[in-house]
Amino acid sequence: MSRAAIKLFAPLALGAYLLGAEPFQFALRPHPVKPEDQPKAQRLGELKLNGDIRLPAFQLTVKDGIAESGWSTATPDSLEVRSTCDPKFAGRLSAFYHTNGWILVPKDWKAVRGANGVDGSEAITFAPPTGVGRLSYWTPGACVGCALSTAAVFFPEAQREAKKEDFLFYNGTNVPLKTVRIRPKMVAYRAVVEGQPIDGLALFDPDNDYFFFMVEVSLPDQDRDLAKPILNWFLPKK
């Protein structure tokens, strides 16, 4: 695995910026972008989960650092997957296909930020039509320094590796962070900003080239129970 040089990197999905030893910033609201730079969504039909659950399915077109047009569209091979979710949540969710697969999103939410980088990085953010809330996914792709700088927030072993390789990494978080190791290489976490919880998952697997991703969601009161199916979607099989 190549040791890419550390660079200033702004994870679009998270609203966090790597600035030396500053704390990682958890935020309730996505950073705004111009309407012309927002992702485009196209209805594909329905996504079938294990054959018996169906969700409205969309594909995303996002800004792309390598595409000649400046945009790229992620297209699934199939509208049927073996994963599932609790049927009681199905009527309140949609499925969006992005560069790294499907993501479950509260119905009526819109993709408001999205980009693919030349290093394989990807960031996508969804927000509700009204009120405060955010759903984001981010992976730094093959940028080792970018991965270690953020993974160090959640994984002591990533912080040790960042120190060993002389990479910058975040110095704590802007609000208290609670983490639980739910798999050997995955952490569940919660941060609370302005009284509203942000729940997420972070995966750190240094044995793979694309070895870090994080997904997090902050939901309005009436939709807080949707955090479970949204995040469980990313859990690896035991």
Image (cartoon, rainbow, N blue to C red):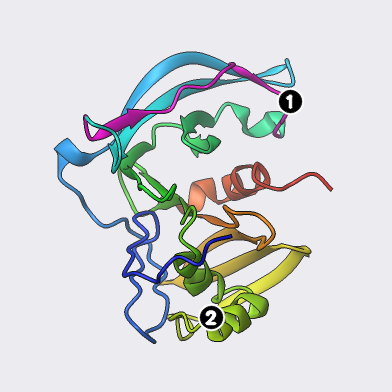
In percent of width and height, residue 130 lies at 30, 44
Structural crowding at the residue carrying mark 1, measured as other residues with C-alpha within 10 Å and reported as few (<14), some (14–19) or many (≥20): few
What's the amino acid at mark 2?
Answer: Glu
Of 160 and 54, the residue lying toward us:
160
Q: Is residue 77 magenta?
A: yes
- The amino acid marked with disc number 1 is Arg
Q: Which residue is mark 2?
A: 165
The image shows residue 200 at horizontal and vertical percentages of 57, 59
Q: How many marks?
A: 2
> In the rendered image of this protein, does residue 82 appear above or below residue 29?
above
- The correct choice, above or below, for 200 with respect to 230 in the image is below
Residue appearing at x 43%, y 71% in the figure:
193
Q: Label 1 to label 2, Cα distance in Å?
A: 39 Å
Q: Nearer the viewer, mark 1 or mark 2?
A: 2
Residue 233 on the magenta span: no
The foreground one among 16 and 94 is: 16
Circle 1/circle 2 CB separation < 8 Å: no
Residue behind mark 1:
82
